[in-house]
Image (tube, rainbow, N blue to C red):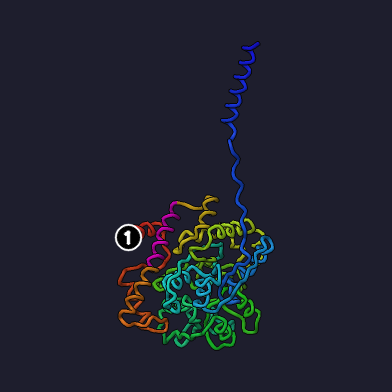
Amino acid sequence: MKKLVHALVAVIVLAGLIVGCAVPQSTPTPEKAFKWPEMLVTVSGAETSPGYYVPLAWTPLHEKATAVKWRVIGAASSAERTQLLRDGSANFYYNSLTASGTENVEARYGLATRGGGPLDLRIALQGFIFPLGVVTRGDSPIKTIYDIKPGTTFGVPVGIATFVDYYYAYRAWLNMSERELIMVPFGNYRAAETALAEGKIDLFFCQPTSAFALEMAGGPHGIRFLDWPEKDVEGEKRFREVVSTVTFSTVNRGVKEGRGVRMHINPWNAYTLRDTDPELVYRLVKWLDENSNAIKGLCAECEDLTLKVLRESLNTTFMPVHEGTIRYLKEKGLWTAADDARQEYNVRLVNWYIKAYAEAIKIADEKGVKVDPTNKAWLEFWTNYQKEIGIPHMTVMTNEEIKAGLAKLKK
């Protein structure tokens, strides 16, 4: 009997050992509850632009789900929008890829201030594809780009650096001088829209889903989007020598006057500063992904607020991606080794611009050059200093070009 008891004890002990090996000794720690901020602020362009009404469309859903209070601010100039992000008045900043690079990193035009300069920006949230066309009134004699003759006036909101660049790029496409394609400067986007509507200028920029396009299309004068034909290879080449941060594609959204028209395309995202809480960014990217079906019908561009569109835009981006965004993309299996290389190149380049700008200000002070965006001598000094140190411009690059560029930056 004693031997039988010992045998049973041995069996029980052995079974316990086996079970102990098969079952985890501790359960996973529950995910820490995340406390959303009481308020979040995003800033964008003019109230008539998608950069304004896209966040205006989806943020009420997020407020309802989380009790966060959102404020969406429309600001007319790049300098104003950037300052709101820089001084902490805004958490996010809807902007185009082109503007983020040429304005916010390269510190061009009104952003080359003593207290300003390059921003340490990161792509944070899902955005949308932004087609931008060159338009005239529907009753204008300009029916194609080949009807643009010397003396044609082109409205340009000079407070937005990218629009100045676009003007020069389209002028290059047309192979026209400044006296032939006349720039008419405006203080903001809305003023230029009004001038076109009133027939005071011949050409301006317009997004086919914008409120202005809808207003003009239904108005007495109508609107016409000019097609930039793919067959004009030399013209497009001249354009890209001035602006290499956009692509051209045929558009099939918005007012009927813009459908089937080839115009330039530029991805928009919500950007934030590098040191924004990664957990906050992660949670927002995740929430937008999980609620994309509910969001897509809210506006024309809202259907783009998906991980798929975000993923595609990152294939050629020249802006770094936020740590919180990367974390979610990795969870979904949407981050690759090529992305690691591109991220390293982009971060190194942004850091170089930040360092170079500080050095340029120091040298300018020593030379007695006043650091002021209204001072032509300072702007020329900053431009020439970039050339002197050989810092590359922010531009669309392939993975192969990234690899070669990273090798140079590491030297």
Residue at (45%, 77%) from the top-left corner?
A: 111
The foreground one among 304 and 325 is 325
Check disc 1 and report its element: helix, strand or loop.
helix
**Residue numbers of the magenta segment:** 337-352
Judge whether residue 262 can be spotted in this image.
Answer: no
**Residue located at (49% from left, 53% from top):** 335
Of 159 and 164, nearer the camera is: 159
Give the image quarter of residue 212: bottom right
Depicted 289 relative to depicted 214: above or below = above
Q: For this view, does 6 lie left or right of residue 226?
A: right
Residue, far top: 1
Instruction: Kindly identify the residue that appears in the image at 45 percent across and 55 percent down.
Output: 339
**Residue identifier under label 1:** 408
| Residue 90, position as x, y percentages in the image | 56, 70
Q: Position of residue 61 (x, y in %)?
A: 67, 63
Magenta region includes residue 344: yes
- Residue at 47 percent across and 68 percent down: it is 246
In the rendered picture of this protein, how many numbered marks are placed on residues?
A: 1
User: Can you see residue 33?
Assistant: yes
Give the answer, above or below, for where 214 lies relative to 396.
below
- Residue type highlighted by circle 1: Lys
Q: Give yes or no for residue 410 being in the magenta stretch.
A: no
17 and 238: which one is in front?
A: 17
Q: Is residue 42 left or right of residue 183?
A: right
- x and y percent of residue 129 in the render? 55, 66
